[in-house]
Amino acid sequence: MIKSLKKFVTDSMAIDLGTANTIIAVKGRDIVLDEPSVVAVNENTREIVAYGVEADDMRGREARDVVVVAPLSGGVVADFERTKKMLNHFVKKAKSGGSQVSLQAVLSMLGDVTHVEQRALLHAAEESHIGKVYMMEEGLAAAFGAGVTANDKRASAVIDIGAGTTNIAVIAKGTVVQSHSERIGGAEINAALITHFRRHRGIQIGEETTERLKREFVSTFLPDDISKTTLVRGRDLQTGKPAAVEVTTGELYPVVEAITRRVAQIISDTLTELRPEVSADIYDRGVILTGGGALLNGMDQYIRNFVNLSVIISDEPRYATVRGLLKMFDEPELLEKVSRNELGILQNAEIPFEA
């Protein structure tokens, strides 16, 4: 009876703990939290003073004793203590009805994550007062969230492009046939743009400006109008004074294309390793794009031309992974089958970030 009552006062959560954003969905409520995976830290006391959106709003305009940091890098935990505190804050925020304990949660992870990295994620989730934690490959979750079914005999290819990683997963009959992850994503485009402006235009630009350029101005596919211009503001590197430069889409396209080409090459290389029948299925079906990178202007066109296959962007691609995780609560047998909780191994994997 107590277990039955718990279902009414606790949540079953799906958690996509990403390099750029943490997204949490709750069974029966869908997406309840979508915030940047950053914290603001007081450099004097080392205490966290803000999380998520509140911390991100400080970025680039921090008080002199505050710094905004991202405790995850490349889809894995880089700073264990801050990841633990950040996840705990987000889980509390996502809970309903004042409940202090979540019944269960399923958490996404990279397919090639090490045992140490996986243990760090699992421990961070356990510290957030979650009763039972399942872990599931991000590529498989993204596939289920994009509409691939567990009983589909034919293979589907899903490419999840995030801020820190690109994950390619080929799925058939609810299992991963082939997968490959690389620590490259939208953050690489940001870094390339910042470097370009510093080296070639003599101006330093911030993260907020860079993100706006990536979302609203640049294109990963050769733009129709390469003379389109925008004004970019920042700090002059020689004088240190506020400054602005005018740039064209034609100037920035090669910068963005260099990163996009690397992503497309990873996809192409992975697809060449498939067995004949799987290749035949992918030829008929094409590939599905998920993740925030799928929304970059021209990304689908570029990949379509590079791999010579049809490319479909899933509905709300940023939420494909978390919705795929959420579906697992309706299929508990499938969840047990696909979860990767090698507890005997993980318990012996030491977390270096705690020291």
Image: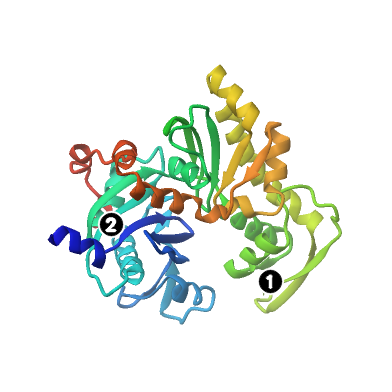
- Residue 157's place in the image compared with 350, above or below, is above
Residues at marks 1 and 2, CA–CA distance in whole angstroms = 47 Å
Q: Residues within 10 Å of mark 1 (few under 14, many from 20)?
A: few
Q: Residues within 10 Å of mark 2 (few under 14, many from 20)?
A: many
Count the marks: 2
Q: Can see residue 355?
A: no
Tell me the residue at 31%/51% (across/down): 121
Question: Which image quadrant: the C terminus?
Answer: bottom left
From the viewer's perspective, is 144 left or right of 28?
right
Tell me the residue at 25%/65% (across/down): 8
Q: Can see residue 134?
A: yes
From the viewer's perspective, is 264 left or right of 45?
right
Q: Nearer the viewer, residue 264 or 259?
A: 264
- Residue 190's place in the image compared with 174, above or below, is below
Q: Position of residue 286 (x, y in %)?
A: 63, 34
The amino acid type, in three-letter code, at marker 2 is Ala
The amino acid type, in three-letter code, at marker 1 is Gln
Colouring style: rainbow
Q: Which mark is residue 196?
A: none
Tell me the residue at 54%/74% (across/down): 60
Q: Position of residue 62 (x, y in %)?
A: 48, 78
Image quadrant of residue 100?
bottom left
Q: Position of residue 281 (x, y in %)?
A: 58, 26
Q: Which residue is mark 1?
A: 238
Disc 1 versus disc 2: nearer the observer: 2
Q: Which residue is mark 2?
A: 125
Q: Position of residue 82 (x, y in %)?
A: 32, 64
From the viewer's perspective, is 33 left or right of 184?
left
